[in-house]
Amino acid sequence: MNSTGTTESESSEEPRSAVLSWSAPATRVNGDGIAMGELDKYVIRYGQNVEDLNEEIVVGEAESYPEMSHTVEDLDVGTWYFTIQAQDKQGLISEPSEPVSKTIQS
């Protein structure tokens, strides 16, 4: 799958959190289209080392929502990096999106 959906880190009213927003992919890596009903879930990976994103959150119901967001809470002070991948119902998973970051001040 093509992870062309955007991943953004936004300010949040909650302290020490990051809001990630993205759109469902419309095509697979090979250029074939992918219908919303074929999507299964999104996998968010994050951590403080962009080379080792050791935390993971799975967001289900991907087939139901073309626009999604998720709030990652309780982040420690420092810079956090996030990627997202889409997985279809056959278990095929996209390459990770380009990493985005958010710095938690306090």
Image: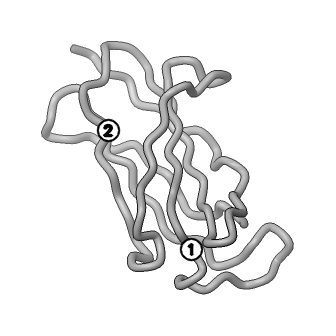
Residue at image point 47% right, 77% down: 63
Numbered disc 1: secondary structure? strand
Q: Nearer the viewer, mark 2 or mark 1?
A: 1
The answer to whether residue 52 is above or below residue 3 is: above
Task: Identify the residue position indicated by label 2 in the image.
Answer: 72
User: Where does residue 17 sit, x and y in percent of width and height?
Assistant: 26, 33
Work out which quarter of the rendered image holds the C terminus and state it: top left
The answer to whether residue 50 is above or below residue 85 is: above
Q: Residues within 10 Å of mark 2 (few under 14, many from 20)?
A: some
61 on left or right of 28: left
Residue at image point 64% right, 44% down: 98
- Disc ID at residue 39: 1
Closest to the observer, 63 or 22: 63
Q: Quadrant of residue 54?
A: top right
User: Where does residue 88 sit, x and y in percent of width and height?
Assistant: 63, 69
Q: Amino acid at mark 2?
A: Val
- Total labels drawn: 2
Residue at image point 57% right, 18% down: 49
Q: Amino acid at mark 1?
A: Leu
Numbered disc 2: secondary structure? strand
